[in-house]
Image (cartoon, rainbow, N blue to C red):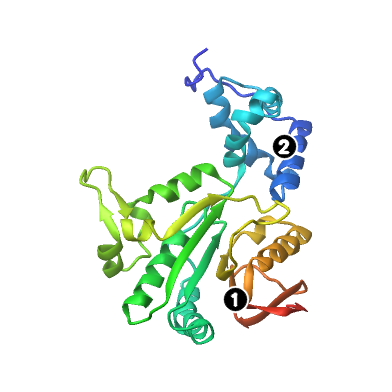
């Protein structure tokens, strides 16, 4: 059988038992809620991997993923397949206005005009958020600020991180970027048939991508962060996982550091060392409060 022949490659339906096994792993190891209503989605996302391996049974695929050989080679591909990677340039743009109007001047006063700030795009997907931050920071510097910066971008998906490192995006992805910033920070492909752009070396050198699973016991960074973007990730976690993840993130933040969360997310009722300063913007404090 040719595994690439979609006409004869007929998948067996995923049983409730097998879905439950996948769902238990995804929730316990990745923190992502996986109710029965997601079974069809999981089937669809796994089919590309199964086709590439010539496997038509979800039971067989599960057995392979968690076999000694599969854990070495296939498990990471399965994780990539089932995790949602959705992001855009300048998503929720009010956050970037608040960053330049309020946060950066405040940090310059508190840390010093020439301080080096550390920023974290947590759950960065394919890098659009991290490169948006880099554009904003570079524009701020060019207006006369002496602040310098480094940006860390983390995600659990290896494929997404590879895309971020390459910094190559389809032209239809850059619609939210102003024309001035496009000319300054994006390079068009010499092959105009490809209709892709690449982020300039200046921005690519400012962002360090690395893999991180939020379910790890602690997040190991050499220094603490001044600004964290942790947006549109909490919606995939249950309440206890949301709070435990945020606590671990807070441990990676300096006192007085800022955290941006997604506009559809709430930290209300969580006992966290964060105080709200604007809509979905928080400052790290020493006091645990029910935000």
Q: Residue reaching furthest top?
A: 1
Secondary structure under tag 2 reads: helix
Q: Residue at x 57, y 41 (%)?
A: 80
Residue on which the image places disc 2: 22
Rendered location of residue 217, percent (x, y): 73, 53
Res. 137 image quadrant? bottom left
Residue on which the image places disc 1: 257
Label 2 with label 1: CB-CB less than 8 Å = no
Q: Say which of 137 and 18 sits in front.
A: 137
Q: Is residue 254 left or right of residue 85?
A: right
* Gap between marks 2 and 1 measured at Cα: 37 Å
Report the label total: 2
Rendered location of residue 101, percent (x, y): 45, 84
Near mark 2 (Cα within 10 A), the count class, few <14, some 14-19 or many ≥20, is some
Question: In this view of the protein, can residue 50 be seen by the observer?
Answer: yes
Q: Residue at x 38, y 65 (%)?
A: 176
Res. 233 image quadrant? bottom right
Q: Which image quarter holds the C terminus?
A: bottom right
- Counting residues from the N terminus, which is met first, the one under dot 2 or under dot 1? 2
Question: In this view of the protein, can residue 44 be seen by the observer?
Answer: no
Q: Residue at x 38, y 79 (%)?
A: 146
């Amino acid at each position: 059988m040719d595994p690439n022949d979609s006409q004869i490659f007929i998948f067996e339906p995923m049983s409730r038992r097998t879905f439950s096994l996948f769902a238990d792993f995804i929730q316990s190891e990745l923190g992502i809620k996986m109710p029965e209503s997601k079974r069809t989605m999981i089937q669809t996302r796994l089919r590309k991997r199964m086709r590439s391996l010539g496997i038509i049974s979800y039971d067989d695929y599960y057995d392979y993923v968690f076999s000694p050989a599969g854990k070495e080679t296939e498990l990471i591909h399965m994780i990539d397949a089932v995790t949602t990677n959705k992001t855009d340039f300048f998503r929720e743009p009010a956050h970037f206005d608040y960053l330049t109007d309020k946060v950066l001047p405040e940090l310059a006063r508190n840390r010093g005009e020439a301080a080096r700030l550390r920023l974290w795009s947590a759950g960065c997907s394919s890098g659009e958020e991290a490169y948006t931050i880099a554009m904003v920071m570079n524009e701020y510097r060019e207006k006369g600020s002496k602040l310098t910066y480094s940006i860390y971008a983390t995600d659990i998906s290896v494929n997404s991180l590879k895309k971020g490192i390459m910094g190559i995006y389809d032209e239809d992805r850059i619609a939210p970027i102003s024309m001035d910033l496009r000319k300054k920070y994006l390079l068009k492909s010499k092959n105009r048939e490809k209709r892709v752009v690449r982020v300039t070396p200046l921005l690519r050198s400012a962002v360090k991508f690395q893999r991180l699973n939020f379910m790890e016991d602690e997040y190991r960074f050499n220094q603490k962060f001044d600004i964290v973007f942790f947006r549109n990730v909490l919606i995939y976690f249950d309440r206890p996982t949301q709070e435990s993840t945020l606590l671990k993130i807070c441990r990676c933040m300096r006192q007085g550091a800022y955290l941006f969360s997604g506009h559809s997310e709430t930290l209300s009722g969580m006992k966290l060392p964060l105080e709200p300063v604007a809509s979905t913007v928080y400052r790290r404090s020493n006091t645990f409060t029910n935000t």
